[in-house]
Image (cartoon, helix red, strand yellow):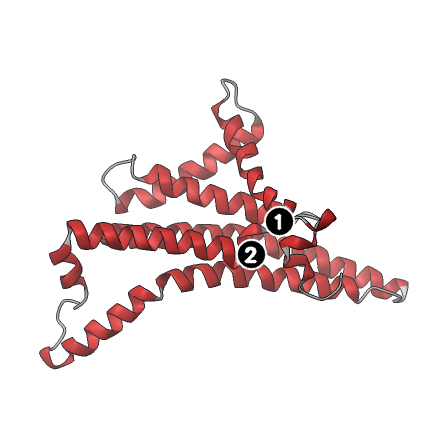
Amino acid sequence: MTNLFSSFDPMSASFSTQTNWLSSIIFLMVIFPSFWLSNSKSGLMINEILYTILKEFVPLFKSYKNLIFFITIFLFILVNNLFGLMPYTFTSTSHLAVSLSLAMSLWLSFMLYGWVNNTKHMFAHLVPLGTPIILMPFMVLIETVSNIIRPITLSVRLAANLTAGHLLLILLGESMVGAAPIVILSVTMAQLALMTLEGAVAVIQSYVFATLTTLYASEV
């Protein structure tokens, strides 16, 4: 590595090309087997996870049809997060080019739909119920700012949590260069524990992203 952040550079692959972006296609390798007539054990596990997430999102919508899109977003982020923990694999969701583009497009579509089809509801949502008259202008300003920064918080939360764990793994790996055997063994055990934590973070961040997106969509 030339520097600490080179592992997050998609141009760091061989031949100086952006082939690392192809890691996002791993998502298709998980989706297509789910349509097979005979499910494997991994397919059954994925179906069980998706069914559990579906039960979490059902109270927000009246129809299951609306939830297919959000389940797909959850699975896309989850697969990219988990496969990004593999060696020599670029984590596309840790790059703002992916996370910010995804969050911005979702937020913009929700806002356009809400303001075009439910204009009165969107105006009423700027002032919470029971707000004193004197505080209404301030509440409108606060709610407007909170709506505008939603795509930024969604994308930065996802990218920052993944980047922080990857940097810790890189720092621990560099500390083993020329170290004593006892130090190498200790750092290796710490990396294994951190990898377990990173796996949990990958699942939690995909769930948080999908849940917040579902909440934002239910408001409009």
Rendered residue at 63%/48% (across/down):
18
In the image, 215 versus 182, the foreground residue is 215
Percent position (x, y) of residue 201? Answer: 55, 56
Q: Amino acid at mark 2?
A: Ser
> Which callout, 2 or 1, points at the residue further toward the start of the chain?
1
Q: In the rendered view of the protein, which quadrant contains the N terminus?
A: bottom right
Q: Which mark is residue 94?
A: 2
Q: Are marks 2 and 1 in contact (CB under 8 Å)?
A: yes
Q: Which mark is residue 188?
A: none
The residue labelled by disc 1 is 84
CA distance separating discs 2 and 1: 9 Å
- Secondary element at image label 2: helix
Number of marks in picture: 2
Rendered residue at 49%/58% (across/down):
158
Percent position (x, y) of residue 6? Answer: 69, 61
Residue 92 in the image: above or below residue 30:
below
Rendered residue at 52%/60% (across/down):
159
Q: Amino acid at mark 1?
A: Gly
In the image, 18 versus 102, the foreground residue is 18
- Secondary element at image label 1: loop
The quarter of the picture where residue 107 lies is bottom left
Q: Is residue 184 left or right of residue 194?
A: right
Q: Is residue 140 left or right of residue 198?
A: left
